[in-house]
Amino acid sequence: MGDLLGVAVLGAGHMGADHIRRLDRVVSGARVAAVADLDSARAEEAVAGIDGVSVHTEVEAALDSPGVEAVLIASPGPAHEQALLAAFARGLPVLCEKPMVPDSAGALRVLEAEARRGRRLAQIGFMRRYDAEYRRLRALLADGRLGRPLMLHCTHRNVSSPPGFTSAMLIDSSVSHEIDAARWLLGQELTAVTVVRPRPSSGAPEGLLDPQFVLFETDGGALVDVEVFVNCGFGYQVRCEAVCEAGSARIGDDHGMLVTARGSAGSDVPQDYLVRFAEAYDREVQAWVDATRRGGVTGPTAWDGYAASVVAEAGVRALENGTRVAVELAPRPDLYR
């Protein structure tokens, strides 16, 4: 491995372009060696001013480019399975944005493919595990001073949903972050999901069931509720309150600069997840680069990616059927125990 880890970035859209910037300007120990995107003009724009980067429209061509030693997948979710399997076949370590694979059957195929190799190659991009507030909350819950966690109350709000956003995507795209965060914070698996919803907001596009209220049960007896509202209109808000036997703790209250003027007071509300979780993304990618350069893999596993896909799939069924849906996970391979 060279002085700088050569990374192939798959996908040059909103997320991919931000990771290209991050690898080039923020993270130490890595460089962008290749980029693949079906839109070659978009890829060229994303790497403008960066020397030594080859641009491709095919995943395999990018993975086989000279100097590529690792892969960062930021393409749309349906393309992830092919990219992950291609990287595994070449023995390349991967940081894959969530969802690992949107459907549970595909996620299981990826899980089994990595398990057959007998070693971890994939870190899944659940960046909230790298957020300072989430890490403090997890440490607080782990030390037991508040007693056993009983409930998590979560809020996930976006300014507006992008074109083509569906009612199911409120769960399998937005709430997938809360699914992983709850599993990680509590150290418990989610075992069942129920979705209820109020009358849709007038700010939601026609036909979009927004907001929704999602309730998860865990194998440790805790409850997790999530208010997801992707057309709230005013900002990007992510909050989580843990209610325990001997106290509670809440994160995400936007303790930024408070401005007072002309008889009013207010503070900025982030408008985008890349703003709210900028430092978490930086820490996540740096941790991946550092571990890869040492020859290891850390962070969320393919099992975490698989579990999130199964739970989200159950959540979509609960939304569509109006019933409580049990979560059924495959046996966990020894690699992830």
Image: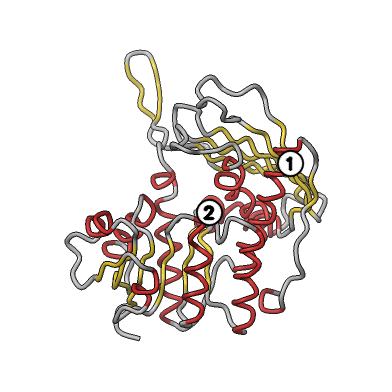
Mark 2 Cα-neighbour bin, 10 Å: few <14, some 14–19, many ≥20: some
Q: Amino acid at mark 1?
A: Ala
Where does the image place residue 299, in percent across and percent down from the top left? 55, 68
List the residue tagged with mark 2.
128
In this picture, residue 322 sits left or right of residue 14: right
Give the label on residue 177, or none. Answer: none
Examine the image and state in which quarter residue 332 appears: bottom right
**Distance from Cα at disc 1 to Cα at disc 2:** 25 Å
Where does the image place residue 127, in percent across and percent down from the top left? 50, 56
When the figure is inspected, residue 205 is found, relative to residue 143, above or below; the finding is above
In the image, what residue occupies the spot 25% across and 71% down?
54
When the figure is inspected, residue 50 is found, relative to residue 278, above or below; the finding is below
Q: Is residue 247 visible?
A: no
Where does the image place residue 225, in percent across and percent down from the top left? 70, 40
Q: Secondary structure at mark 2?
A: helix
Nearer the N terminus, badge 1 or badge 2?
A: 2
Examine the image and state in which quarter residue 270 appears: top left
Q: Give whichever of 262, 320 is nearer the camera.
A: 320
Q: Give whichever of 102, 7 is nearer the camera.
A: 102
Where does the image place residue 65, in percent across and percent down from the top left? 31, 78
List the residue tagged with mark 1.
318
Q: Amino acid at mark 2?
A: Arg
In this picture, residue 34 sits left or right of residue 289: left
In this picture, residue 160 sits left or right of residue 34: right
Frontmost of labels 1 and 2 is: 1
In the image, what residue occupies the spot 53% across and 64% down?
124
In the image, what residue occupies the spot 59% across and 36% down?
167
Q: Secondary structure at mark 1?
A: helix
Asked if the residues shown at circle 1 and circle 2 are in contact, with their CB atoms under 8 angstroms apart, the answer is no
Mark 1 Cα-neighbour bin, 10 Å: few <14, some 14–19, many ≥20: many
